[in-house]
Image: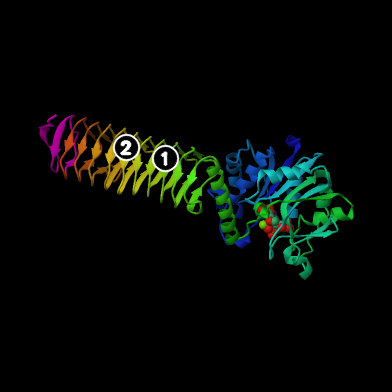
Amino acid sequence: MSKHVRAVVLAAGKGTRMNSVRPKVLHELCGRPMLWFVLRALHEAGVDDVTVVTNSDVAPHVEAIARLAGHAASSAVLQEPQLGTGHAVQIALAHLEPREGTILVLNGDMPLIEVDLVRSAMARAGNALALVTARMPLPSSFGRIVRRGEHVQKIVEARDADEDELLIDEMNAGLYAYDESKLRSAIAELRNENSQGEYYLTDTIGNFRERSETIVPVVAGDYRSVLGVNDRIELAAASALLRARICEHYMRKGVTLVDPQSTYLEPGLDIAADVTILPNTAIGRGSSIGAHSEIGPNARLQNARIGEHVTICDSVVIDSAIGDLAIVGPYAHVRGGAEIGTAVRLGNFVEVKGSTLAPGVKANHLAYVGDSTVGERTNIGAGTITANFNGKVKNRTTIGKDVSIGSNTTIVAPVTIGDGALTGAGTVVLRDVPAGDRVVGNPAKTLGKKTP
Ligand code: UD1
Ligand code: MG
């Protein structure tokens, strides 16, 4: 059934209440734009024929967001100017070839939506309208569901509601499963006689009622899954709920979160069972973590591939990989495509950028290792700097295996230090050092071969 269902997502609103240059549906929660969550729920429900109603600020982003949400393709239609949710649907329908069957309409500002609710609405499709509603604590800015007996009579926007209507605690969620041809005829008759001077999609309900069409209310089990985000306060509230939901997902999969309240995880991470995440830790952008690793406290991982039995505390890892058994931190910054080998130790104010560190390398104190390749078991002493930038270009440093880099060595790239070499404290290396050589001074001079 689902393959015949298509959907329209309303995402063209100005989002005035956000007070932002960024369009509302592009504001992020848990590392994803608001619109992603709506598109994701549709994709999970098997609805891939989706038209997003956008404005010119949102339009350039729709394709990427739709793909990230799992849709093979996306279709966007511009609504300019934005004259209300009913007008947005008019624009979408004008763009779509008429078809018999169900058409879902969803607000783009309901990031807490879950696939089950989309499925519940679809299960009641076949009527003129399956209307998702939710009982909610008052006060609320949602549109009120006015019923007579069991029957839905109309929806009154909070702004247009009288005192009695404002006491109604059943709300319009912003998720509708319409019979398409009935929607087409109702949408043509909308008027903008309301406090906003807008065409309200919700007025189709009154229209259906006058024509004795069947409106089936589908009451959401948990109002929190339909909370709309209209301002930054609602954005923070929705983020907190989403964050808790995402944390629960990983905990169910076997990840220990010592303090979910201060753990910030994105959807879609690959975290193995028996990983422990300590407080105040943020992990995002498709990172992965192998079993038995311990991340945090105070860690930030972005696009990080972390092996098994790794320890990372008080550190930042971005766009990099960390091998099994490595210990990173406290206070390390690993970034820019760094590849950190098995059992490497990095910490106490060490920055590694765009470098490959072979297994067993140690850089334990106050160092910068940039654009370098470092061989197995090499020790980088405190205060070592690879001077990789000459003011114009970045140059590479190659350090062999079993090398001892003395404290406060400055390595001026491009340069190669051979296997088993040693630099004394305070050495400034300007030229290549042959394997096994001991060098000291500024500029480095050889003292001959290292005694084995
Ligand atoms: C809307 C509903 C309200 C419901 C609430 C649920 C209407 C008239 N009201 O109110 O009954 O309780 O959602 O969250 O529908 N949009 C467009 N084009 C426009 C205007 C809006 O695409 O011209 C989009 C917005 O980007 C947004 C969605 O439609 O994603 C809803 O618009 P919004 O202004 O947030 O409506 P609410 O006041 O929240
Ligand atoms: Mg809204």
* Residue at horizontal 68 percent and vertical 39 percent from the top: 45
For mark 2, give the secondary structure: loop
Q: Within the magenta stretch, is there residue 448?
A: yes
Give coordinates of residue 330: x percent, y percent. 34, 48
Circle 1 residues within 10 Å: few <14, some 14–19, many ≥20: many
Q: How many marks?
A: 2
Magenta-highlighted residues = 427-452
Query: Horizontal and vertical percent for residue 247?
Result: 54, 47
Residue name at image x 13 percent, y 32 percent: 450
Question: Mark 2 — residue?
Answer: 344
The residue positioned 61% from the left and 38% from the top of the image is 70
Residue 441 or residue 236, whichever sits in front: 236
The quadrant of the rendering that contains the C terminus is: top left
| x then y, percent, for residue 206 | 83, 57
Q: Is residue 321 inside the magenta stretch? A: no
Q: Amino acid at mark 2?
A: Val
Instruction: Choose between 368 and 214: the one closer to the eye.
Output: 214
- Residue 163 in the image: above or below residue 361: below
Secondary structure beneath disc 1?
A: loop
Q: What residue did someone put label 1 on?
A: 293
- Tags 1 and 2 touching, CB below 8 Å: no
> Left or right of 394: which side holds 201?
right
Question: Closer to the N terminus: mark 1 or mark 2?
Answer: 1
Is residue 45 among what the camera can see? Answer: yes
**Amino acid type, label 1:** Ser
Q: Which mark is residue 270?
A: none
Relative to 112, residue 254 above or below: above
Q: Residues within 10 Å of mark 2 (few under 14, many from 20)?
A: many
> Quarter containing ligand 1?
bottom right
Quadrant in which the N terminus appears: top right
Would you place residue 254 above or below residue 174 in this image? Answer: above
Please say whether residue 82 is visible from this viewpoint: no
